[in-house]
Amino acid sequence: MWRMWNYGRCTKECTPSISTGAPPTSCSVSGLIAGEALSAGDACYIKSSDGKAYKATGAAANAAAVVDGFAPSACPLGEATSLYWNVNFYYGAGLTPGSFVYLSATTAGGLEDAATTGGTTPIGRVIDASRIWVQKSY
């Protein structure tokens, strides 16, 4: 799970998980290969040069700052994975309902509570103290 820090960064306290009971197939893409080891809840993008899933980062305004979905579980490099969006994830405790989350500039795949260089638009909204509704970059 994630917890907001004083500096706006979020860190995982335990494993994030999808809390949407039955995510619709229209909110996922399957059959991807992990281009690096992914952790549950990581914001990911699909790299155009190889079609694999990588951790997205808001460090720069480039292709890696586009969020194509979120990893539902940990996945080692080279293994099959899926990405989900427009679903709810359990992320932490003490989150501020109604606040937006953005792609982290300091932690690949992570979230922050303020816009970053590459994460200028919200990619999620906190819906209660422990869950975030996550979405793609548009």
Image (tube, rainbow, N blue to C red):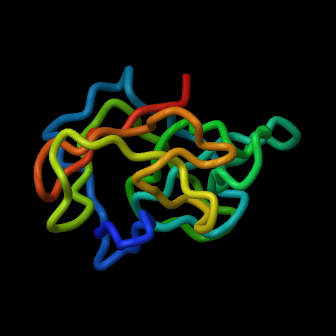
Between 116 and 12, the residue placed more toward the observer is 116
How many numbered marks are there?
Answer: 0
What residue is at 30 percent from the left and 79 percent from the top? 13
Q: Where is residue 106 in the image (x, y as percent from the top left)?
A: 62, 67
Residue 52 % position (x, y): 72, 47
Q: Is residue 11 above or below residue 43?
A: below
Q: Quadrant of the N terminus?
A: bottom left
The residue closer to the viewer here, 42 or 132, is 132
Residue furthest to the right in view is 49
Quarter holding the C terminus?
top right
Q: Is 117 situated left or right of 96 in this image? A: right
Question: Compared with residue 27, is residue 106 higher up or lower down, i.e. above or below?
Answer: below
Q: Position of residue 31 (x, y in %)?
A: 57, 40
Instruction: Tell me the residue at 26%/61% (across/down).
Output: 91
Residue 16 vertical placement versus 103 (above, below): below
Q: Which residue is at the far bottom?
A: 13
34 or 64: which is nearer to us?
A: 64
Q: Residue at x 53, y 51 (%)?
A: 81
**Quadrant location of residue 86?**
top left
Q: In this view, does 120 lie to the left or right of 16?
A: right
Q: Residue 68, image x and y in percent? A: 57, 35
Relative to 62, 57 lies left or right: left
At 27% from the left edge and 58% from the top edge, which residue is drawn?
17
Farthest residue to the front: give it.
6
